[in-house]
Image (cartoon, rainbow, N blue to C red):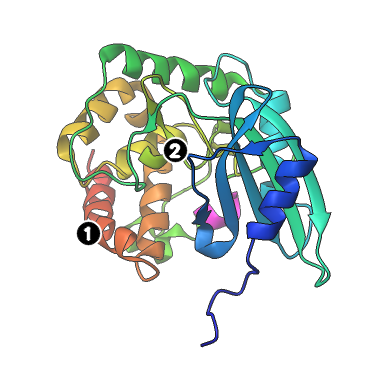
Amino acid sequence: MTSSNPFPDLTGPWHRAARELAATPDPGGRLRAGMGGRTLGGPVIVKDVQGWLRVTVVPRAGGKIWEGTNLADVLLPEEIPRPALLGDLTGNDENGLVFQVHLWERLQGEAVSLTPNLDTPIWVTDRWWNDLRTALDHLHRAPTPSGRRVVTQDYIDRIPRFIPALQGRDLTVERWETSHGDLHWANLTTDPLQIIDWEGWGSAPAGYDAAVLHAYALTEPQTAARVHEVFADMLDTPSGRLAQWVICAEIIQAADRDPLHARLQPRAQRLAEELLIS
């Protein structure tokens, strides 16, 4: 039977990358595919350090996502808790596909959620919330390289297609800030806090990270309320409301593509309507 996966088996490239980076596969671990077969990651040992090696296959090198991990490692403040990048390399196969390899320190804690959204309350300490707020404050003050945008003004001008009540409103972004861009619950860890997956970071409307976190908690109202409490000074502003409309539009747009966003869609629509009268 022919596989529907358009990407090649990455097991061989993963093991070759491990050898090139002098990393030994962890005998107690297993390889995990992700992003529809476009990535393969697994635990390794490098000079007695526990690491995580991931291979990503792309049609061509270059672009925002390609550069994001390495730029984040070099440019973002050390005060933002995230796994250290231990090594990287690139390569090609005989079919012209490009492989990008990253080797990180292994996560110190567990992901808050296995999915971007939440179905049950999260049990984290007040210190965790304070650490998250401090980390994002450091991030938002950091400079963004020219041209790195999480979303563009052109896209924002089109969100009335998904939230018709915004038709005719001025949606001009007054303040942009450096943002993670994909700050959902699967990209955060607990005990201790770390923030992962920096491929898409860049400039976004002020409050966007808090808006994403809040929107993906809408399926768990208790945590959504805590997010709003911690980030009220970002969310309850004109820029914060615009950022929330942006992520609501993105969720509504994605609802036809997967069940997770289909579940979030009615909640995102309700939030977008509530923001119109707030």
Image spot of residue 212 (x, y percent): 39, 41
Asked if residue 207 lies left or right of residue 153, the reply is left
Image spot of residue 247 (x, y percent): 40, 48
Image point 38% across, 31% down: which residue? Answer: 110
Residue 152 seen from this side = yes
Image point 41% across, 32% down: which residue? Answer: 188
Residue marked by disc 2: 187
Marking on residue 45: none
Within 10 angstroms of label 1, few (less than 14), some, or many (20 or more) residues?
some
183 or 18: nearer the viewer: 18
Marking on residue 266: 1
For the residue marked with disc 1, what is the amino acid?
A: Pro
49 or 140: nearer the viewer: 49
Image point 60% across, 44% down: which residue? Answer: 200
Image point 43% across, 49% down: which residue? Answer: 246
Decide whether residue 154 is among the magenta residues: yes
Asked if residue 16 lies left or right of residue 169, the reply is right
N-term-proximal mark, 2 vs 1: 2
Within 10 angstroms of label 2, few (less than 14), some, or many (20 or more) residues?
some
Q: Using the image, determine if residue 148 lies above or below residue 35.
A: above
Disc 2 and disc 1: Cα gap in Å? Answer: 23 Å
Q: Main secondary structure of the magenta part?
A: helix
Residue 145 seen from this side = no
Image spot of residue 277 (x, y percent): 22, 43
Which quarter of the rendered picture does the C terminus lie within? top left
Question: What range of the chain is rendered magenta?
Answer: 152-156
Image spot of residue 77 (x, y percent): 63, 18
Instruction: In the displayed orientation, state which residue is furthest to the front.
Output: 27
166 or 5: nearer the viewer: 5
